[in-house]
Amino acid sequence: MSESIVRTEDLWVEYPISRGLFKSVKIYAVNGVTIDIKKGEIVGVIGESGSGKTTLGKAILKLVDITQGKIYWGDKDVSRWSNRKLRKLRRYYQMIQQDPYSSLDSRMKIYDIIAEGLRVNKLVHSKEEEREIIYNALKDVKLNPPEVFFDKLPTELSGGQRQRVVIARAIVMKPKFIVADEPISMLDASTRGQVLEIIRNIKNETGTSFMFITHDIALGSYISERLAVMYTGTLVEIAGSEDIIKKPLHPYTQALIEAVPKANPEAGIPKVNIKGEQEPLFEKPKGCVFYDRCPFAMNVCKEKIPSLKDMGNNHYVACHLY
Ligand SMILES: Nc1ncnc2c1ncn2[C@@H]1O[C@H](COP(=O)(O)OP(=O)(O)OP(=O)(O)O)[C@@H](O)[C@H]1O
């Protein structure tokens, strides 16, 4: 079995929110997720808005506090590590956010934006070395000729060009793992394919692993080797992308796939054709989180949380039907 780059065990994240004076409630955003991402693998995380995809990605990167469970970076259990202790490893674990407009400092030149992490982490020893790394990174993300972009400001670039700068800023750190959170959803159709190709090239050439977060199952299966399906903070199914598309086992995954042809091509958001809506969880789940909407719900589903079952061929599903 190949090397694990990141791994979680029974990971829980709760957000405290205040409701009026003295009253505080919690949102159970990630509920008992166990997932393992291997070296050089792209794992797509799919699910509707509010299913906990971003929270899972941020929790793995130690950007939000966890309530329970374990997070491993390689073989290191970093679950309880402080920011100070994480500092040396952080460069290897990066995030590419959805919005390339807000993720770049509009007053900084592109060259300095990309150089910042190198300088802070003292990874370069001369101006020439720094220039060469930045030149190559811009070339890798197809911003050509690279030197033309050195002195530009983010405001002079298109959305697609900005997202490529965000990727260049991440790859100069030689990351082992990148959470790409809906990285193309705010881009024009014409540049989406280019950004996907860049991500795929980085993976192929450097062996960097990705968690690719998307609500679009077709896109997820196109870019990823494996797909993980989330519903209300819970990982309900994970398998090879082709297996998920051809043999979905969880009733929620089946509904997601059925909804694809009816998708609104403009928004790219499939309408899931099952009763009700996904609601935030204000109480710790006692049974299956999909119980209220599941056409096959049984008594046991209300009372017992289904664990991920191994269905063979690396296909796992959390459902009492199996
Ligand atoms: N900072 C926060 N404080 C309180 N609740 C939050 C916070 N961030 C997310 N949530 C809630 O946690 C749940 C999971 O949200 P999350 O953003 O992780 O889902 P998502 O699948 O990434 O959704 P989207 O596709 O809309 O980004 C939702 O109910 C959301 O409202």
Image (spheres, helix red, strand yellow):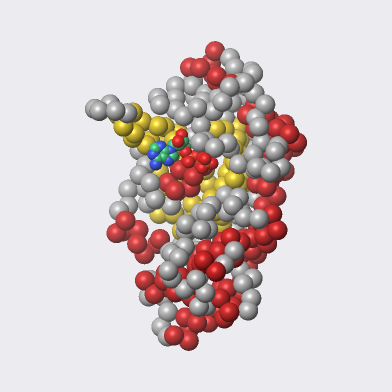
The residue depicted at 50 percent of the width and 27 percent of the height is: 279
- Image spot of residue 149 (x, y percent): 56, 76
- Image spot of residue 77 (x, y percent): 39, 50
The residue depicted at 65 percent of the width and 46 percent of the height is: 220
The residue depicted at 47 percent of the width and 80 percent of the height is: 130
Q: Quadrant of the C terminus?
A: top right
User: Which is nearer the eye, 6 or 294?
Assistant: 294
* Residue projecting furthest to the front: 156
Q: Is residue 285 left or right of residue 307?
A: left
Q: Is residue 257 left or right of residue 132?
A: right
Q: Is residue 33 visible?
A: no
In the displayed structure, 16 sits above or below 85; it is above
The residue depicted at 64 percent of the width and 23 percent of the height is: 274
- Image spot of residue 171 (x, y percent): 52, 67
- Image spot of residue 30 (x, y percent): 45, 36
* Residue projecting furthest to the top: 299
In the displayed structure, 295 sits above or below 99; it is above
* Residue projecting furthest to the left: 22
